Image (tube, rainbow, N blue to C red):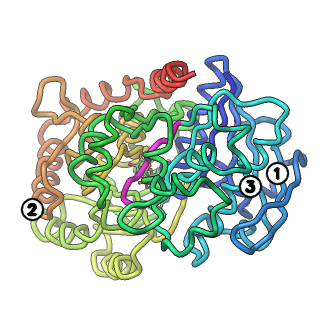
Amino acid sequence: MEILHVSAECYPMAKAGGLGDVLGALPKYQEQAGHTVKVIIPMYRTRYLYRKEWELVHEGRQQVGFYSFSYSVIRERSRELGFDLYLLDINGLLDRQEIYGYEDDPQRFLAFQVSVLDWVSQWSHRPDVIHTHDHHTGLIPFMMKYAYAFRDRLQHIPSVFTIHNAQYQGWLGWQHREWLPAHDEWKSGLIEWNDQINPLAAAVKSAWRVTTVSPSYLDEIRQRSNGLEKLFEYEKGKCLGILNGIDADVWNPVTDPLLVTNYGIETITAGKMANKLALCKQFGLDATRPLIVYIGRLVHEKAADLLPEAFYQCLQHFGGRLNILLLGSGDPGLQTTFKEMSNRYVGSFSAYIGYYEELSHRMYAGADFLLMPSRVEPCGLNQLYALRYGTVPMVRKTGGLRDTVTDMGDPGGFGICFDQASVGDMVHAVGRALELYESDRVRLLGMQEYMMGFDHSWDRSALQYLQLYKSIL
Ligand code: ADP
Ligand code: GLC
């Protein structure tokens, strides 16, 4: 099969979160399973772009509304990622350093999608499947079927749409519908939800199949999905939950070049301690105490707003018995709060505000516990990385966290789970972590060895996607 993934992110070229990780790994595993896989994302001006060699493969012209532009497509020459990575450039729209966060994001991603379809419709052959991800590429399944410029060539190609996060839907005022290429107006209901253009809803209605990144999240979005609950109820017949995997080559404590010391199951205690010592030294923490970390976006869906009060209470109740280290960026108010807390609780609390890939690896390795109190977690990759690095996940039971972590109080359990995204539940979970660390090291080691033995690589889930494609070919 020939599979084309269209996305806004792909690690290591462009990553803002788990979407980037998935697009950097799933295609590689699909290629290893014997298929031809291509990924196309916008040509942001990231470091990876300037470090690699690229060849020009296509140039074309398109327009969004009255804005006409030329675009180009380049391909990474060495195929070092294990699949073909293509970048699409549009001067003035995509040539930016950041992935998201610009006022004209709706135009940027619409221009990207239109140009991708223009490029594919000029291929001398057809890909077997076009797989798009999240709302930035959500209008593609609709345009493949109903845009006059593309439908003759593309309407018979199966489209799969994966929802990594249904909170963000890419809403656009209805008055902007002339930005879309000319299409069958009778079908314009497919792009509408609550009197707006809703690219996520459009994809759910128009794609041949829809997947979520965990089975539990698929159940949850029928109850709670930022206004799309009914839509997911209507469309449940074409939806499937496929749990994300991890890139077991990139996330491997035995070989990870970013770690201070590499380690495996046999050397877990010494290996983790060496990494913990280095981290604690860097952040002025005490390596004799347990180290609890948070890594992630500082946003409401991750319950980051509850962290200051939860950390404050933990430091009051358990002060002197633990260290907390946070790596994250997002809400400016929270960023300031965490910087202030670092100054106030020197020796027990520290925070690195910003995005720092290398540090995240060292934290998964050096930490004893990883806290994820998410209100919403479609899958979550952090807890899977934690498992691989022998770090006990402390998670709220939701979405993919529910599907991947079993509480240590349950049969076969290896993590700490709680029900509510609340300060009380978090403080209680930290209390359980301290109890385990201080009073039952043998059990802790047993849990670490057990979790490091899990295979959460993409092997299994990549096959599930391939089976899904086959079912609609
Ligand atoms: P989401 O995509 O919702 O942010 P995931 O758990 O799927 O959540 O993936 C988050 C990814 O982003 C992980 O690879 C995590 O290590 C990484 N990450 C998040 N915040 C940071 C940060 N500040 N610095 C480095 N890596 C980060
Ligand atoms: C989204 C979700 C996260 C998921 C990631 C990759 O960012 O918030 O839970 O792991 O996508 O699918």
Residue 115 - label:
3
Amino acid marked by disc 3? Ser
Foreground label between 3 and 2? 3
x, y (%) of residue 221?
Answer: 28, 48
Residue underneath mark 1: 73
x, y (%) of residue 289?
Answer: 25, 54
Task: Locate the C terminus by quadrant.
Answer: top right
Q: Is residue 245 above or below residue 175?
A: above
Q: Secondary structure at mark 3?
A: helix
Give the residue drawn at x 45%, y 69%: 329
Amino acid marked by disc 1? Val
Between the residue at mark 2 and the residue at mark 1, the CA separation in whole angstroms equals 51 Å
With 385 as the anchor, is 407 left or right in this view? left
Residue 337 in view here: yes
x, y (%) of residue 340?
Answer: 34, 82
Give the residue drawn at x 48%, y 48%: 203
Q: Is residue 108 magenta?
A: no
With 437 as the anchor, is 118 left or right in this view? right
Q: Is residue 418 above or below residue 445?
A: below
Amino acid marked by disc 2? Gly
Q: Is residue 227 above or below residue 249?
A: below
Segment tinted magenta in the rendering:
160-168
Foreground label between 2 and 1? 1
Give the residue drawn at x 82%, y 37%: 123
The mark that comes first in sequence, 3 or 1, is: 1
Residue underneath mark 2: 424
Q: Secondary structure at mark 1?
A: strand
The mark that comes first in sequence, 2 or 1, is: 1
> Does ligand 2 reach within 8 Å of label 3's beta carbon?
no
Give the residue drawn at x 11%, y 56%: 425
